[in-house]
Amino acid sequence: CGCAKAAVSCCGLDEAAAALAPRLAALLALLDDADLDVRKECLVALHATAHHHASLLAPHLAFATPRLTELAQLQLKRVVDLGPFKHTVDDGLPVRKAALAALATLVAQRVAGVDCAVIVPAVAAACADKVADVQLAGHQILGGLCGHAPAAVLGASDSLLDPLDKAV
């Protein structure tokens, strides 16, 4: 995945399309991998592809978008016992941040085929998250969606009002 990210971000469109396009489906299949680190690196590669060569992703968005929204809401919390103290660790936080970064880039690049109505529930969950970085990413995506697909945002305004009210 790291090699794919480097190839996408440094090569020209023709070179990247020739090298990556036939392998993109296999790369995106790693979004379903059991290892969280593999998922995160796949999300980083997807983010780089969306940023530099968004047209390569268009045929694969029907597969990738539901997985991105699922990973954007992933919470794997566990309690670590430190003797007299207990600490809660969220192992899903890096994956959640990477998925939101990829979604933000897809919305900002206005990639054809992005189903904004599918993204809005994940954005609402991000805006309601307790982690400030995740909230910030959710608000960034929401701002992009308001300009790109206002009807999708308006249709889900009920789920967005409570998180936005708490943020203010």
Image (cartoon, grey):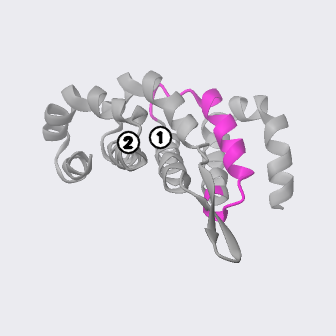
Q: Which residue is disc 1 drawn over?
A: 106
Q: Quadrant of residue 53?
A: top left
Q: What amino acid is found at the position of numbered circle 1 in the picture?
A: Leu
Q: Between residues 84 and 105, which one lies in front from this camera angle?
A: 84
Q: How many labels does the image show?
A: 2
Circle 2 — which element?
helix
**Main secondary structure along the magenta-highlighted residues:** helix
Q: What amino acid is found at the position of numbered circle 2 in the picture?
A: Ala
Please state the extent of the stretch shown in magenta in the rendering.
111-134
Q: In this view, does 157 lie to the left or right of 38?
A: right
CB within 8 Å, label 2 to label 1: yes
Residue 120 inside the magenta-drawn segment: yes
Q: Between residues 106 and 127, which one lies in front from this camera angle?
A: 127
Q: Quadrant of residue 84?
A: bottom right
Query: In the rendering, at what x and y percent does residue 137 appear?
Result: 60, 55
Disc 2 from disc 1: Cα separation: 6 Å
Q: Between residues 53 and 35, which one lies in front from this camera angle?
A: 35
Q: Residue at x 22, y 53 (%)?
A: 6
Q: Is residue 3 above or below residue 151?
A: below
Residue 72 inside the magenta-drawn segment: no
Q: How crowded is mark 1: few (under 14 residues within 10 Å), some or many (20 or more)?
A: many
Earlier-in-chain disc, 2 versus 1: 2
Q: Is residue 107 left or right of residue 132?
A: left
Q: In this view, does 40 lie to the left or right of 146?
A: left
Q: Residue at x 70, y 44 (%)?
A: 125
Query: In the rendering, at what x and y percent does residue 63 appear?
Result: 44, 23
Query: In the rendering, at what x and y percent does residue 40 appear?
Result: 41, 49
Circle 1 — which element?
helix
Labelled disc at residue 50: 2
